[in-house]
């Protein structure tokens, strides 16, 4: 099941690349780097989340940082 | 980077759903919890965050013409600190949009599509908004111009149809404990009003910038009236105790509508219209994220980043959010504080630096 999901995520990433890559001009090296970095991060994160769906996320970090103060303000 | 231009009225129509989109679901029960039967007054206090946001965004734009917040924060704070602040702001909007999409999909699956997996709802919404963002600011502006008036019209219709069932005595005793409860109730909605600061990403692309202030204020007043009317309607219909316990009080209020046992089950139409409003909301925020990211990294075009960043937003709507309890906790406790820091205090700080720079002539470009 996880294997199929990983393949699914990979297909989405490949489709995005096939759609965007030909539209980037030869001069746009910086844009290409940004696109590859961004897509790579997204693919890695998607696969990690498929295997560890309960991983602590950004909203947990923010809750840990601001939750106690927020609760005291609400009272 | 962005060659499109929008009119100030389009900007106003873009901002209205940005604030009301998720707010109209959460604000009634959150304010009822804190303010009791003075909940209808809370949005009026909370609107002050919107006034501050519009004021700072407009003045920052006046002092730093034709630049978005990403560009002038770099100029005002220096290259390194400016980029750090910009990235933190974009991260904040990414978490906000991911959380917003999750609220939307939980709402849709919770009350309508009970069998549909959440990720289908989230992905289809983000795919649609990715296409709109890719079309540029003009496309988003016209989409808002087309959808928002229908959205407002249906909200008015709902209020009109609820009217016969209202029991105004639910609001009594009014201001029993003074203004304190209603001010406490304003703490959560102020973060939604502060979302008006998103105009800092849009003003550089507004034609006839001088009208931007007027239309921004019109939009803010419309949002304030909407939230006040929603809270009043829910309070008059259900009373404070019931409202505080419900997850989606407005939806329950709409389900209540029955004119001559003929006009019933309006919630599905209202839902369809609300989805359109939520779509405008996510598109506008997504546009700000994509444009901002391209500007932080000084790219010539933002279009290539649209799909990867929309995918990232989909991931952010699942990462660390287990269920609706998480969303409610985040919206009621964490988000008001992070929003206060990122959308109210940070812009005010930037404005102070900007004034200081202009007065003294220090830190030239």
Image (cartoon, rainbow, N blue to C red):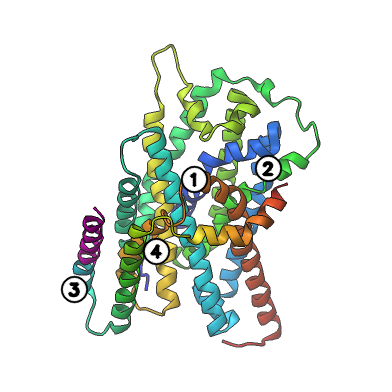
- Identify residue for label 1: B22
- Identify residue for label 4: B5
Q: Measuring 63% from the left and 63% from the top, which residue is drawn there?
A: B341
Give SS at disc 3.
helix
Can residue B175 be seen? Answer: yes
Marks 3 and 1 sit apart, C-alpha to C-alpha, by 37 Å
Does residue B15 appear left or right of residue B339 in this picture?
left
Dominant secondary structure of the residues highlighted in magenta in the image: helix
Give SS at disc 1.
helix
- Identify residue for label 3: A22
Give SS at disc 2.
helix
Asked if badges 1 and 2 are on one and the same chain, I answer yes
Which chain does the residue under circle 2 lie in?
B
Q: Earlier in the sequence, mark 2 or mark 4?
A: 4
Please tell me how crowded label 1 is: few (under 14), some (14-19), or many (20+) other residues with Cα within 10 Å. Answer: many
Closer to the eye: label 4 or 3: 3
Give SS at disc 4.
loop
Q: Nearer the viewer, residue B218 or B160?
A: B160
Provide residue B103's location: percent of width, then percent of height: 45, 46
Residues drawn in magenta: A1-16
Marks 2 and 4 sit apart, C-alpha to C-alpha, by 38 Å
Marks 3 and 2 sit apart, C-alpha to C-alpha, by 52 Å
Please tell me how crowded label 3 is: few (under 14), some (14-19), or many (20+) other residues with Cα within 10 Å. Answer: few
Pointers 4 and 1 in contact (CB under 8 A)?
A: no
Which chain does the residue under circle 3 lie in?
A
Quadrant position of the C terminus of chain B in the picture: bottom right
- Identify residue for label 2: B185
Closer to the eye: label 3 or 2: 2
Please tell me how crowded label 2 is: few (under 14), some (14-19), or many (20+) other residues with Cα within 10 Å. Answer: many
Q: Measuring 37% from the left and 43% from the top, which residue is drawn there?
A: B276
Q: Nearer the viewer, residue B125 or B281?
A: B125
């Amino acid at each position: 099941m996880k294997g199929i999901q990983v393949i699914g995520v990979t297909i989405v990433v490949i489709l995005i690349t096939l759609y965007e890559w030909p539209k980037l001009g030869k001069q746009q090296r910086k844009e290409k780097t940004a696109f590859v970095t961004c897509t790579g991060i997204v693919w890695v994160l998607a696969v990690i989340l498929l295997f560890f769906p309960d991983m602590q996320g950004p909203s947990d970090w923010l809750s840990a940082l601001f939750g106690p103060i927020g609760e005291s303000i609400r009272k | 980077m962005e060659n499109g231009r929008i009119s100030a009225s389009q900007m106003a129509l873009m901002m209205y759903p940005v604030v009301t989109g998720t707010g109209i679901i959460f604000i009634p029960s959150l304010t009822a919890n804190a303010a009791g039967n003075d909940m209808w007054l809370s949005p009026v206090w909370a609107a002050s965050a919107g006034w501050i946001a519009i004021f700072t965004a407009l003045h920052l734009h006046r002092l730093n013409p034709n630049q978005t917040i990403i560009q002038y924060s770099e100029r005002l704070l220096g290259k390194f600190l400016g980029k750090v602040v910009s990235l933190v702001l974009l991260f904040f909007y990414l978490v906000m949009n991911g959380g917003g999409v999750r609220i939307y999909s939980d709402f849709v699956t919770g009350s309508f599509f009970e069998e549909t997996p959440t990720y289908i709802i989230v992905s289809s919404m983000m795919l649609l908004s990715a296409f709109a963002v890719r079309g540029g600011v003009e496309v988003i502006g016209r989409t808002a111009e087309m959808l928002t008036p229908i959205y407002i019209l249906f909200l008015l219709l709902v209020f009109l149809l609820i009217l016969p069932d209202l029991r105004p005595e639910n609001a009594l005793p009014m201001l029993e404990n003074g203004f304190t409860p209603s001010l406490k109730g304003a703490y959560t909605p102020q973060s939604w009003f502060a979302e008006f600061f998103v105009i800092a990403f849009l003003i550089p692309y507004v034609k006839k910038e001088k009208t931007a202030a007027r239309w921004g204020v019109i939009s803010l007043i419309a949002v304030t009236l909407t939230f006040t009317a929603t809270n009043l309607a829910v309070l008059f219909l259900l009373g404070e105790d019931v409202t505080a316990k419900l997850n989606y009080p407005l939806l329950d209020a709409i389900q209540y509508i029955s004119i001559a046992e003929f006009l019933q089950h309006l919630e599905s139409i209202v839902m369809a219209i609300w989805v359109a409003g939520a779509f405008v909301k996510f598109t506008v925020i997504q546009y700000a994220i994509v444009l901002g990211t391209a500007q932080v990294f000084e790219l010539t075009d933002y279009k290539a980043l649209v799909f990867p960043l929309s995918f990232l937003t989909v991931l952010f709507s699942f990462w660390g959010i287990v269920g609706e309890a998480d969303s409610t906790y985040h919206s009621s406790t964490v988000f008001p504080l992070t929003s206060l820091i990122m959308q109210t205090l940070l812009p005010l700080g930037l404005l102070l630096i900007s004034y200081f720079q202009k007065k003294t002539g220090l830190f030239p470009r």
